[in-house]
């Protein structure tokens, strides 16, 4: 489902970073560990097609991301990649249901039934709620629901547990793994949270300023 060759990237004025290659089948999960500033989010952006590598390739279900134009990448991302950001980044003017419907609209894809998805994540009672009224844990679940709304082939989660206690950390990781298995998606979780290693045994570590 997901395969990378050794990816190289450099931010302006900084040394190149080389990321180890890996591959994931549908339903498999990978944990990317590293300290703050190590390049974890850079790797996530490469996998999402938000950065273009200097060398190497990201291939998702037979499509090389580097071969797509900007507009093609935007549409491909909307249909095939779900991103769970560290902060929910929900649209305040829309309620929970409308935030998820927006994902369907932009991807031009029917996707999952929103009510069923919210029910599976335990927040069906919040469908018509304003996002400002959600607790931190509820907001994170809505963010996960939005990432899953289009049944993506790849789920990317950026520090999804950094502000959660142990109980909610376990719940969020369980939700991500269960949903990835259900829809047959590859799951990549990027974090410095060592607690997540208790739930995902497959991991790689990235280190800052690994010049090549």
Image (cartoon, rainbow, N blue to C red):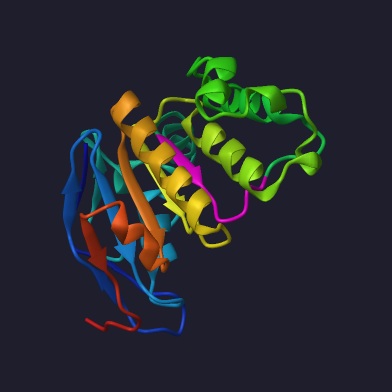
Q: Which residues are magenta?
A: 81-89
Residue 186 x %, y %: 29, 39
User: In this picture, is 155 found above or below 116?
Assistant: below
Residue reaching furthest to the front: 167
Confirm whether the magenta stretch covers residue 83: yes
Quarter of the image with the C terminus in it: bottom left
Residue 156 shows up from this direction: yes
Residue 41 x %, y %: 44, 63
Residue 85 x %, y %: 54, 51
Question: Which residue shows up at 49% across the image and 57% down it?
Answer: 166
Q: Is residue 188 left or right of residue 62?
A: right
Residue 52 shows up from this direction: no
Confirm whether the magenta stretch covers residue 32: no
Which of 167/72 is in front? 167
Which of 211/190 is in front? 190
User: In this picture, is 149 found above or below 66?
Assistant: above
Q: Is residue 48 left or right of residue 2?
A: right
Question: Which residue shows up at 23% across the image and 53% down it?
Answer: 57
Q: Is residue 65 left or right of residue 111?
A: left
């Amino acid at each position: 489902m997901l395969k990378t060759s050794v990816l190289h990237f450099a931010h302006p004025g900084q040394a190149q970073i080389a990321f180890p290659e890996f591959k994931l089948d549908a339903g498999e999960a990978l944990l990317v560990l590293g300290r703050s500033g190590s390049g974890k989010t850079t790797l996530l952006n490469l996998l999402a097609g938000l950065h273009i590598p200097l060398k190497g390739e990201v291939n998702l279900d037979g499509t090389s991301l580097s071969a797509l134009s900007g507009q093609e990448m935007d549409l491909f991302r909307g249909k095939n990649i779900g991103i769970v950001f560290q902060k929910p980044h929900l649209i305040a003017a829309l309620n929970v249901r409308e935030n998820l419907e927006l994902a369907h609209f932009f991807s031009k894809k029917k996707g999952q039934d929103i009510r069923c998805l919210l029910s599976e994540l335990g927040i069906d009672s919040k469908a018509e709620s304003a996002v400002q009224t959600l607790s931190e844990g509820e907001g994170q679940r809505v963010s996960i629901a939005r990432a899953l709304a289009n049944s993506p082939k790849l789920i990317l989660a950026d520090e999804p547990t950094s502000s959660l206690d142990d109980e909610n950390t376990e719940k969020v990781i369980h939700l991500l793994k269960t949903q990835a298995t259900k829809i047959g998606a590859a799951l990549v979780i990027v974090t410095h949270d060592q607690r997540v290693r208790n739930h995902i045994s497959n991991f790689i570590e990235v280190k800052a300023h690994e010049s090549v």
